Amino acid sequence: MDSVARLGERLQEFAAARDWEQYHTPKNLAMALSGEAGELVAELQWLSDDETKAGLAEGPLKERLADEAADVMLNLVRLTDMCGIDLIEAANAKIERNETRFPPKT
């Protein structure tokens, strides 16, 4: 999978094959995204920085974080697809606005 657009298409096909489009409203997808972000946070919530570093080096934590990060991304891509938002274009526009709002220290 080499693009956000192709990932969106794959998610669209996945949802259609399971008749899930009826559930994929912007509100429902935003709520699912929030829940998945919470699950990502929960993996790290009570770990110290040293415990996180050790967990990432050993593998199991990294695998769990990868799964949760993927869930966040999949819900975000599906949400933006359903809303007609080009995620890459929106992200670049946001970075450009932030460059103006937060100029580098000189």
Image (cartoon, helix red, strand yellow):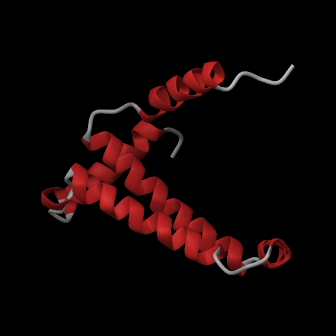
- In the image, 88 versus 11, the foreground residue is 88
Name the image quarter holding residue 61: bottom right
Residue at image coords 34%, 41% = 80
Q: Is residue 102 left or right of residue 57?
A: left
- In the image, 33 versus 59, the foreground residue is 33
Q: Is residue 97 left or right of residue 45?
A: left
Compared to 23, does 105 lie above or below? above
Compared to 72, does 44 lie above or below? below
Q: Is residue 28 left or right of residue 106?
A: left
Name the image quarter holding residue 43: bottom right
Q: Is residue 53 left or right of residue 67?
A: right
Name the image quarter holding residue 60: bottom right
Compared to 26, does 66 lie above or below? below
- In the image, 6 versus 47, the foreground residue is 47
Compared to 84, does 73 lie above or below? below
Residue 69 is situated, as x and y percent measured from the top left of the image, at: 55, 61
Instruction: Please state the total of marks drawn on the protein image.
Output: 0
Residue 99 is situated, as x and y percent measured from the top left of the image, at: 65, 22
Residue 87 is situated, as x and y percent measured from the top left of the image, at: 44, 35
Residue at image coords 52%, 28% = 94
Q: Is residue 69 visible?
A: yes
Q: Is residue 9 visible?
A: no
- In the image, 68 versus 20, the foreground residue is 68
Position of the C terminus by quadrant: top right
